[in-house]
Image: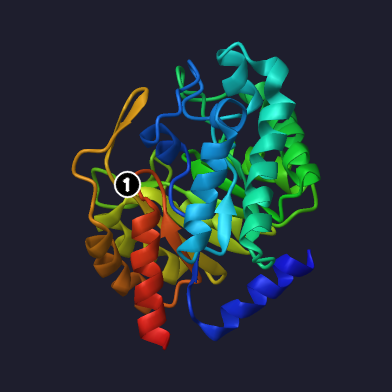
């Protein structure tokens, strides 16, 4: 916990801290085969050295948070893949590999965040009746494997987000919430599931959530999302956008934003004094390297 508290204490300096880029889609790009019905969650067991190298690449380019490759290893997702018997091993190894990368880097201040998502890939939404118990079990495994905090990712629906959050908070670890957003037909910013971002933030204010991430969201929509946060959120803020296109079950790497253009787009977000910045699907280590250069130049 001291590593986490020292990290958060740096937010008062108003200099954004780098997190990593994509792990799941980067594993796909580097040739790690997908799990049937569980997307890109298999690398921790099938290709652990590739997953570890992905973490190391981000750390080498300045990332100070690495996120475990457990986004797609929820109990329900692995059940769909016929691999529920490996649930504990997938999640434990995902954190252990991130810790091993930290140890190799000799940068002891790196935070390891345990990724949690409730999505089921063939069917979309999870079984709500068992969601709390399933998420809590996953969160405990990630905690006990050594995660410094839990990172809820791609939260799309307010009710499901709150169930997932309550289960994660029960572990006693700090929990950051990642919201994925779009614009609805009325021009309002909402979660991908349709709930208004303003309504979601009102509910999150009632919980012990220190930081909200706008993540897995289009680059050109981030500033409008930050407008909503400016008006409705007084906690810490992070941004990690995506680039490319998802065509089930693969991420399509056509029209990926260049590292230089991603850094250029990030300038306006950084000026708004966000606390952390990185990238989601499609964002690679070179993007993080450009962000690191930008932040270093701005604060050098």
Residue shown at the point (30%, 73%) measured from the top left: 268
Q: Secondary structure at mark 1?
A: strand
Rendering quarter of residue 247: top left
What colouring method underlies this structural image?
A: rainbow
In this view, the residue in front, 163 or 14, is: 14
In this view, the residue in front, 298 or 242, is: 298
Q: Quadrant of the C terminus?
A: bottom left
Rendered location of residue 144, percent (x, y): 81, 43
Q: Would residue 172 be found to the left or right of residue 74 on screen?
A: right
Query: Which residue is label 1 attached to?
Result: 182
In this view, the residue in front, 37 or 253, is: 253
Q: Would residue 219 be found to the left or right of residue 204 on screen?
A: left
Question: What residue occupies the far left of the structure in this picture?
Answer: 255
Rendered location of residue 157, percent (x, y): 49, 38
Crowdedness near tag 1: few (<14), some (14–19) or many (≥20) residues, C-alpha within 10 Å? many
Residue shown at the point (60%, 32%) measured from the top left: 44
Q: Would residue 5 be found to the left or right of residue 294 on screen?
A: right
Rendering quarter of residue 223: bottom left
Rendering quarter of residue 33: top left
Rendered location of residue 174, percent (x, y): 71, 57
The relative height of residue 184 versus residue 4 in the rendered view (above or below) is above
Residue shown at the point (40%, 61%) measured from the top left: 288
The relative height of residue 69 versus residue 215 in the rendered view (above or below) is above
Residue shown at the point (58%, 62%) measured from the top left: 211
Disc tally is: 1
Residue 167 shows in the view: yes
Q: Quadrant of the N terminus?
A: bottom right
Residue 206 shows in the view: no
Rendered location of residue 173, percent (x, y): 75, 54
């Amino acid at each position: 916990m001291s590593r986490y508290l020292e990290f958060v204490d740096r937010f008062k300096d108003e200099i954004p801290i780098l997190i990593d880029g994509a792990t799941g889609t980067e594993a796909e790009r580097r040739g790690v085969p997908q799990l049937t019905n569980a997307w890109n969650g298999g690398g921790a067991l099938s290709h652990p050295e590739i997953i570890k190298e992905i973490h190391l690449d981000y750390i080498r380019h300045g990332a100070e948070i690495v996120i475990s490759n457990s986004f797609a290893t929820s109990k329900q997702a692995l059940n769909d893949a016929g691999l529920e018997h490996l649930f504990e091993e997938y999640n434990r190894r995902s954190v252990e590999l991130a810790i091993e990368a930290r140890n190799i880097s000799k940068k002891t201040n790196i935070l390891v965040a345990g990724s949690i998502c409730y999505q089921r890939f063939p069917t979309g939404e999870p079984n709500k009746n068992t969601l709390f118990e399933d998420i809590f079990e996953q969160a405990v495994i990630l905690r006990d494997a050594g995660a410094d905090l839990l990172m809820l990712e791609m939260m799309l629906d307010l009710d499901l987000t709150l169930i997932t959050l309550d289960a994660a908070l029960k572990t006693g670890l700090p929990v950051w919430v990642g919201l994925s957003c779009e614009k609805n037909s009325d021009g309002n910013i909402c979660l991908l599931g349709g709930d208004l971002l303003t309504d979601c933030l009102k509910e999150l204010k009632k919980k012990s959530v220190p930081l909200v991430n706008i993540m897995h969201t289009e680059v050109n929509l981030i500033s409008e999302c930050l407008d909503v946060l400016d008006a409705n959120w007084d906690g810490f803020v992070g941004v990690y956008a995506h680039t490319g296109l998802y065509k089930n079950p693969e991420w399509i790497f056509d029209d990926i934003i260049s590292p230089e253009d991603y850094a250029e787009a990030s300038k306006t977000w950084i000026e708004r004094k966000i606390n952390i910045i990185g990238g989601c699907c499609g964002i690679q280590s070179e993007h993080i390297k450009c962000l690191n250069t930008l932040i270093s130049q701005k604060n050098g």
